[in-house]
Image (cartoon, grey):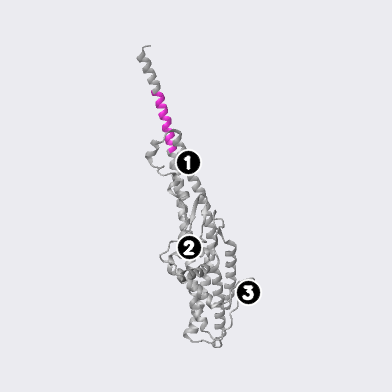
Amino acid sequence: MPLPLIIGGLAAIAGVAGVGSGIHGGVKMKEANDTMKAAKSKQERAVALFEKRNSETTELMDSIGKQELEILSSFDDFSDIIEKIQGRPDFKAYKKSGIKLPEYEAEELKKVSAGAGVLLGGIGGATVGTAGGFAAAGATTSAVMALGTASTGTAISSLSGVAATNATLAALGGGSIAAGGGGMALGTAVLGGATLGVGLLVGGIIFNVTGSKLSDKADEAYNQAKRTEREVNKIVGYFDELTSAATPFKASLSEIEKQYRKRLATLDHVVNFSEKVHWSEFTDKEKQMTENTVLLVGLLYKMCKISLVLKDQDDDGLNAVNKNEVSSIVNDANKILDEVKGAA
């Protein structure tokens, strides 16, 4: 056979092989591209879920934290009214049916009230989640710490560190969950854009990666997206657990506050408008109302002292939701509320 025909035949064979290789490469490229798209979709769904639940939980915790601080800041007005009443009895600590509430101490309440005022003054320009950090750590304790911090001249903005020490979240897996400033966010190692590799999803890059390398990169991206999904499901479960404890706590706190403020307004009218400043001038109903107001203050003080979250000691996992103590204080609050309403 003439040499040109042989060369032509070999070239044709090579051409067919090249086309076959090209088709195979194209199939692999399409498969890899589909995997990349699936990874991106999975990643985006996980991030969207986290952001939604994070926002909802932060809003709930912030509302509780702010409410607690507003309650505590009102204790100064309460103490001023009580201290005007001459010949009043000593309001002892409440002990009944296994429930214990603190004894009335004017100086302690004034200190807590002042600290709460300091924190409220700094919340306005603070990061979202800061107030929630105080609720997580216990607003009463945070208020006392804040007063001490402020008295040293430390900037109010730095007080967010009080919340951060016992913030809603600690660390999660390979990425951190920081509560700097009281906020809650997953670290970039878990949810950041780098999870899928910088530029990995840019369309043109697939033409610069060939063969098994392309498939490997696509598989790696998909596996990382699956890890993100697992971590998000883990933290969303935590959000659900925190919400299930915080929601009834807030409902109970709101009802107790409502009863407290109603009686505080009445007591204010009796003392400052009717000018009854001696206990002997009070009617039996007014005496009962005063005692119940003191009782509600003690209950609110204790409720605001509860840490909704217990900090993880090892800093290598999620903080624990303080379910048992929260449930206990809610039960106690409901019992006292029934007692106070029955005496009204």
Which numbered disc flags the more N-terminal residue, 1 or 2? 2
- Residue 261 visible? The answer is no
Q: Is residue 295 magenta?
A: no
User: How dense is the environment of label 1, judged by Cα within 10 Å: few (below 14), some, or many (20 and up)?
Assistant: some
Instruction: Note whether 36 is above or below 328 in the view shown.
Output: above
Question: For the point 45% across and 64% down, which residue is it?
Answer: 158
Q: Which residue matches tag 1? A: 220
**Residue ID at (53%, 59%):** 242
Between tags 3 and 2, which lies in front? 2
Residue bearing mark 3: 95
Q: Is residue 22 above or below residue 239?
A: above
- Residue at 46% across, 85% down: 273
| Amino acid type of the residue tagged 1 in the rendering | Glu
Asked whether residue 23 appears in the rendered view, the answer is: yes
Judged left or right of residue 315, residue 119 is left
Quarter the C terminus occupies: bottom right
Quarter of the picture containing the N terminus is top left
* Cα distance between the residues tagged 1 and 3: 61 Å
Q: What secondary structure is the magenta-colored segment mainly?
A: helix
The residue range painted magenta reads 15-32
CA separation in Å, label 3 and label 2: 35 Å
Q: Can you name the residue that lies furthest to the top here?
A: 1
Q: Which mark is residue 161?
A: 2
Q: In front of the other: label 1 or label 3?
A: 1
Label 1, label 2: how far apart the Cα atoms are:
38 Å
Q: Position of residue 298 (x, y in %)?
A: 56, 74
Q: Position of residue 267 (x, y in %)?
A: 51, 81
